[in-house]
Image (cartoon, helix red, strand yellow):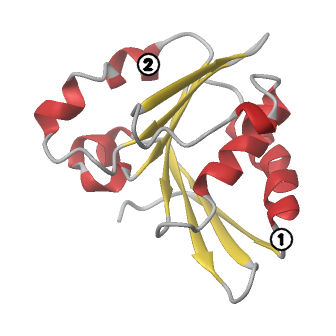
Amino acid sequence: MTEFAKQKRFKTRSEAGTLAMGERVAEMLAPAPKLIILRGELGAGKTTLVKGIAAALGAAEAEDVTSPTFTLVHEYVGAKTRLYHLDLYRLETERELLTLGLDEMAEAQDALVLVEWGGKFPGVVARADGEIEIEHAGGDERMFYVRMK
């Protein structure tokens, strides 16, 4: 795991809490461009967090944000930010990753790129500006570790 200069820890007790926390996290991720790796096991709440971030940035309504597990990339455009939400779970090689255009997304003006399962690829880890790790803390509770360079 990469060393990061700043780390913040948050705890939520419900899905609604995770959505609301997206606003706090969105403030930490400004200004764009940024590439952030989202870490956590299946069902940890990665997409729920993205819903909250997208809503806070005005890029999409929370209910319009869905997991890109099968499409690999979803793009949401707000007045000030272009949000890319990627899910690399199904990819196996760096070659497959290249076809997505991640470099172009990450370099786009005012872009925020949130990558689920990005830790599988050393190139994504090296390029990341930060990461958000989500852990189950029992029941509906989650611990969030936000680490930034």
Q: Residue 20 location in percent, x, y?
A: 88, 53
| Above or below for 9 versus 97 | below
- Residue at x-position 78% and y-position 38%: 63
Which residue is more in the foreground, 54 or 4? 54
Q: Residue furthest bottom?
A: 138
Q: Which residue is mark 1?
A: 14
Place residue 56 in its image quadrant: top right
Report the number of numbered marks. 2
Q: Residue 102 location in percent, x, y?
A: 35, 25
> Judging from the image, what secondary structure is the residue with disc 1 in?
loop
Which residue is more in the foreground, 31 or 19? 19
Q: Is residue 102 left or right of residue 145?
A: left
Q: Residue 129 location in percent, x, y?
A: 49, 41
| Above or below for 35 versus 75 | below
- Residue at x-position 33% and y-position 51%: 89
Q: Which residue is mark 2?
A: 105
- Residue at x-position 82% and y-position 23%: 58
Q: Residue 60 location in percent, x, y?
A: 76, 25
**What's the mark number on residue 135?**
none
Q: CA distance from mark 2 to mark 1?
A: 31 Å
Of the two numbered discs 2 and 1 in the rendering, the one whose residue sits closer to the viewer: 1
Place residue 126 in its image quadrant: top left
Amino acid on which disc 1 is placed? Ser
> Judging from the image, what secondary structure is the residue with disc 2 in?
helix
- Badge 2 vs badge 1, beta-carbon distance below 8 Å: no
Amino acid on which disc 2 is placed? Met
